Amino acid sequence: MRKQLELFSYDAAPVMASTRDPRARKIITSICEMEKADPKLSFLDSAFCTMSLPARQPANPYKPIQRTDGRYQLLIAPKSVPGEDGEPVCYGVPFGPKARLILVYMMSEARRNNSPEIYLGNSLSHFMRRMGYSSDGGGKNGALTGVREQLRRLLRCEWTIRFVGDDNSETVQDVALANAYEIFQGDAFVKRIRFSDAFFNHLMRHSVPLDERALAQLRDNATAIDLYTWLAFRLPNVDGEIAFEWEKVRKAHFGLESPRMRDFQRAIRDAWIRVQAVYPAAKADFSRPDVVVLRESAPPVEKDFLPRRSHLSPAPLPKPAAAIVDNSFTFPSGSLSFGGPAEQKLREIALDLGGGWDVDRIADEFRKIIRERPDELRGAELLRCWAGFCRSYAERRSGRA
């Protein structure tokens, strides 16, 4: 279909005339609108690419939501806040496509401006119009009302990340999305927010680039947005190909509460048709009954359009003072995002020499190399080997990009 549209310089009319299938016509429209729009870069934190919000309002909106992806777990718990009358109010967990797009907007603004403070005001309204939402929908079921509601829910939840290491040790960290926000006088709409330092630091080191034009075409389907962001994070990190059991995919990322596997598979396959239209470089197979297969693919945004440092992550924050590292330490079994001076030093090396690829992904590959002698490499010798591995990993992966 894309080749046909190329022949007509992305004029939809001649290709539209060849089909009456509403789904095919929607895809034709998506491809043409994307190609005619100016590209604009957006970002999403990798944690939200791998573990998503509910696709629709849960039966019990006040019950905490848990997602699991490998050794990571994300818990989203709504909390009560004082209402206008002083009584506690709980808004419930965020859900649906609007909540996802708000997250993309806030994280993109923070990433572009290199600042944890985000002014929402008119800029959020402009963003939602670029996404295709009407700005005059302030009624009960209007788009603006829905945006306000989801923003309240996002800011009034507690977010907990749990990591389980290879030795079954656990690291639990509470990460507030925002630690302050300002509301317009006499209005329920948030004017300005400030990301917490912990979340902002994680975002700046783990931003996944997205194409805003693609998000605009998927704006009405939370599952399609989830599939697009999941693939945007996963596919450039795949070495060759990798298979996931369908059950693991359902539990890990997608916010669908489908009781039957076949309903879940149907929803993902329908979403895949739409995602292919806006991410043509994506290589995956969702047709198999037992597993999903992901194959190494280019990122959804062209390499020349990304920051020079990397096609996966932005330049890191200024380096902290060099950590004091005990020369007897060995390579840790858990995430390098947590821990003490040793993890911090190893992470700094990976950020400097790893070409911007995901630090924990590099660490997992390094563990495979040293698994026969994990305790033999220590201190300065470990740092030297780690630095060489990070450099060679970046060179090898960049050669495939």
Image (cartoon, helix red, strand yellow):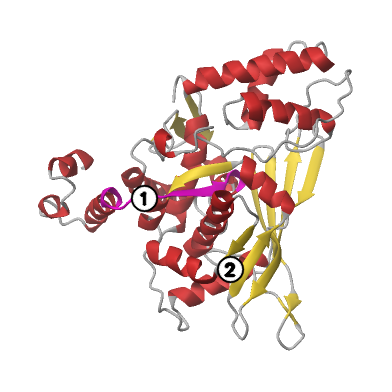
Q: Which image quadrant: the C terminus?
A: top left
Q: Nearer the viewer, residue 176 or 78?
A: 176
Q: In which quarter of the image is residue 375?
A: top right
Q: Give the range drawn in magenta.
A: 34-47
Residue sitting at the far bottom: 85
- How many dots with numbers? 2
Q: Distance between the residues labelled 1 and 2?
A: 28 Å
Spot occupied by residue 151 in the image (x, y as percentages of width and height): 58, 68
Residue shown at the point (59%, 54%) measured from the top left = 110
Give the side of residue 45 with respect to residue 385, left or right.
left
Position of 379 relative to 34 (above/below):
above
- Residue 362 seen in render: yes
Residue 270's disc is: 1
Three-letter residue code for mark 2: Leu
Residue shown at the point (39%, 67%) measured from the top left = 129
Circle 1: is it few (<14), some (14-19), or many (20+) Cα within 10 Å? some
| SS category of the residue bearing label 2 | helix
Asked whether 43 falls inside the magenta stretch, the response is yes
Residue wearing tag 2: 151
Spot occupied by residue 313 in the image (x, y as percentages of width and height): 56, 38
Circle 2: is it few (<14), some (14-19), or many (20+) Cα within 10 Å? some
Residue shown at the point (61%, 86%) measured from the top left = 186
Position of 13 relative to 343 (above/below):
below
- Residue 285 seen in render: no
| SS category of the residue bearing label 1 | helix
Query: Which is more N-terminal, label 2 or label 1?
Result: 2
